[in-house]
Structure formats: structure tokens, C-alpha cells
Amino acid sequence: MKAIKDTVVTIAYNLYDENAEGTLLQEVKSDDAFEFLFGYKDVLPHFEEALKGKEKGHSFEFGIVKDEAYGDFQQQAVIKIPKEVFNIEDKVDQEQILKVGNVLPMVGPDEMPMEGEVKEVHEDHVVMDFNHPLSGKNLYFTGEILDVRAATEEEMAEAKQAEENMNGLSDVDLSNLPQ
């Protein structure tokens, strides 16, 4: 079976910065493989395009430039947020949540869900980075397709619902957030 729309593709891969000799950013082994529904925006468009029509056992190696991946790092997506935004009844919980390196779900402009990484914690504010962790990087993948199977009706229905829910999220404008 070929990797096309409405199939579930299972892969193991290594992700590097720039090229195969670059820094290893992520390793996904076959015993904990990555599975995605082809044709439903589960992965980067250029990632999907590189695997389109390929079958189980196919080894792959390709790059995606940052402009076709997660774009440039945007300094305006690193913002100061007043600590009172994180007010929790239990101060111990706040101290557990507001640790450098934690990734927190937030609600951004227009009530859009976002995730941000805590970069700094100060007395009265927190500095958070809402850039994608791979922004500013050219990506290079090596790996193998472990399996391709037909998606179930349930998998396709869930993907279609998720796709409808995500419409408009790519238009989130971070430029009006406080600096």
C-alpha cells in the first residue's frame, strides 16, 4: 500500500538541524514509532510530499528549509506576562507551573489556544516564548516507513473534525501582544 490520502503511515526517523551531519534534534525509534494520517495536515506539507506514494520499507532522507517548516524565530513572540495571569489558589502549584523550560497551554489573542515555553521567572512577570521550538531551523530527516495501512472510518472522521476546528489558527497574529 502506498502513502496517500486516507492512509495511516508509521515511521521511525531522526531529525537533524541543517543536514545529516547537523545536531540531532529528535530520534523516533521503531519501538516508539510516529504514526500519522496522510492528507489531513498532521505533518508539515513538505514532509508529507516527500513521503507521498512511498511504501512500507522505503528509506527516506530529505530536508525542509525553515521557510517551509516553522519559519523564522520571531522576537515579538517572546513576551512578558504579568504573574497575576497565573494566579492559582495554591501558591505551591504556581511555583511548580512557573519553572523555566515548562511548556504551558495558554489562550492568545482572539481566544486562540497557544503553547508557550517559560524562559524567565521574575518577581512580577514571566517571560514566555510562543515560537515553535523548531522555528528558525532548517530541518533534515532520515528514516524508514515501517507501515502503511488504510485509515479506519473513525480515524478519518476524527481528522476531518480536527481539521475543521483548526481552520483559522494559522492566522494568529502575535504582533499585538505586549512586549
Image (tube, rainbow, N blue to C red):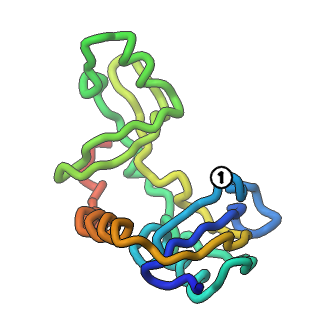
- The quadrant the N terminus occupies is bottom right
Image coordinates of residue 136 in percent, x first then y, are: 56, 61
Q: Is residue 3 above or below residue 145?
A: below
| Quarter residue 58 falls in | bottom right
- Where disc 1 sits, the SS reads helix
Image coordinates of residue 56 in percent, x first then y, are: 68, 78
Task: Please tell me which residue is depicted at 38% across the width and 29% down the height of the picture.
Answer: 126
Task: Please tell me which residue is depicted at 70% across the width and 67% down the height of the picture.
Answer: 18
User: Given the current orientation, which residue lies at the most extreme left position?
Assistant: 110
Q: Is residue 161 visible?
A: yes
Q: Is residue 25 visible?
A: no
- The quadrant the C terminus occupies is top left
Q: How many marks can you see?
A: 1
Q: Amino acid at mark 1?
A: Asp
Q: In this rendering, would 87 be left or right of 60?
A: left
Q: Which residue is mark 1?
A: 32
Image coordinates of residue 45 in percent, x first then y, are: 48, 77
Task: Please tell me which residue is depicted at 48% across the width and 25% down the height of the picture.
Answer: 99
